[in-house]
Image: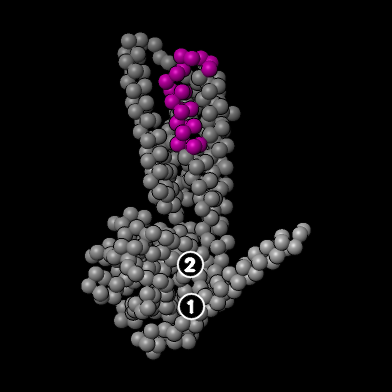
Amino acid sequence: MGSAARAAAAAAAALVVVALATVATAQMESCNDELPPVLVANYSGLACQPVWNNFVLRYHQDKNNVLRVVLSTMYSTGWVGMGFSRDGLMIGSSAMVGWVGKKGLPHIRQFALRGKASSKVVVDRGFLVSNDHDHTVVVQQAKIYIAFQLRFSYRLTHQHIIMAFGNSIPVKNKLTRHQGKTSFTFDFTTGRASVDGSFPYGLRRAHGALNVFAWGVLMPIGAIIARYFRRMDPLWFYLHVGLQFVGFIIGLAGVVAGVALYNKIQADIPAHRGLGIFVLFLGILQILAFFLRPNVDSKYRKYWNWYHHWSGRLALFFASVNIVLGIHVGGADNSWKIGYGFNLAVILVAVIALEFMLWTRWSKNSTSTPTY
């Protein structure tokens, strides 16, 4: 390496060191900044930690489990919020949100985050216990300070935290969509924020995608083939069995992903979990039906038909209900809702048309369709 190259490398290294030192100094200065005088009486002596972008969190929980918080960041207009989540999800969490209104008056309110739509973000609701008179919002030197006190029934250690901001001033306590957000686990004993402990979005997507494809696409197609294409004998039978078996395997993988997701976040969604277990049980009955299928001329064949047909129909019905429920409680975006809604509409239209054609054919031909 020539002298010029070594000099360039040394200069680059020096720039990196200076940049890192500048960042560290800026973070220290953000914590060393004095609080606005109005906050000193109730919020002095707090631990301080930069947590995200220019967001700085000051906090302390006393022996009565009362948590004092001052959240500060750069501010020009809009709103700033800090949410507390039980499972890492935005939906189901509660947030303290502060802003300065159009008339220059400060506002700080609790919101229950029941969904992503504005109508699902409900003011003065949530599981946080607080005293409104202890809350303060101050803007000083282009920074907003949101100060509040919350009482918990336990000592906070690792807590799922959500932070967000919006650029529009809330009107009639209606929050606009955020321009930026993050989620992390904050350790209130050590002051460390950990992204590793945040909600596993990839695992959630895998759980949803596998089950939608298995129970929402493959198995309905397999059922349609069995009911409306029996004249294609024996091709319909092999297609039906093949699609249902592959669908069950993929659905089982989705269940495994769901169990792993539950073990990681311990989300309390009993309806979704209960329906999933019930649908899996019906799916297992369908697999057993293949191995227990009696001969066509057996006197038990009609009972097997009832068992196989109705357990399959119940499985598909409750699976579709659970998919809709999972999309809702999982906070999926509109692409999931539109995609599954379109898929469900196509299946329903196809079933109605094919059922009409089947009954028309039956009315012209009194011979019954073969059983299987």
Check if residue 215 falls in the magenta segment: yes
| Residue at position x 35%, y 13% in the image | 361
249 over 15 or under it: above or below: above
Is residue 82 at all visible to an observer of this figure? yes
Callout 1 amino acid = Ser
Check if residue 49 falls in the magenta segment: no
Residue 12, by quadrant, is bottom right
237 over 270 or under it: above or below: above
70 over 197 or under it: above or below: below
**Residue 30: mark in rendering:** 1
40 or 135, nearer to the observer: 40
Circle 2 sits in a helix, a strand or a loop, which is it?
A: loop
Q: Furthest-right residue in view?
A: 1
Packing grade of label 2 (10 A; few <14, some 14-19, many >=20) is few
Q: Where does the magenta region start and end?
A: 213-235
Secondary structure mostly taken by the magenta-highlighted segment of the chain: helix
| Residue at position x 34%, y 79% in the image | 138
Q: Which residue is mark 2?
A: 53
| Residue at position x 29%, y 72% in the image | 100
Packing grade of label 1 (10 A; few <14, some 14-19, many >=20) is some
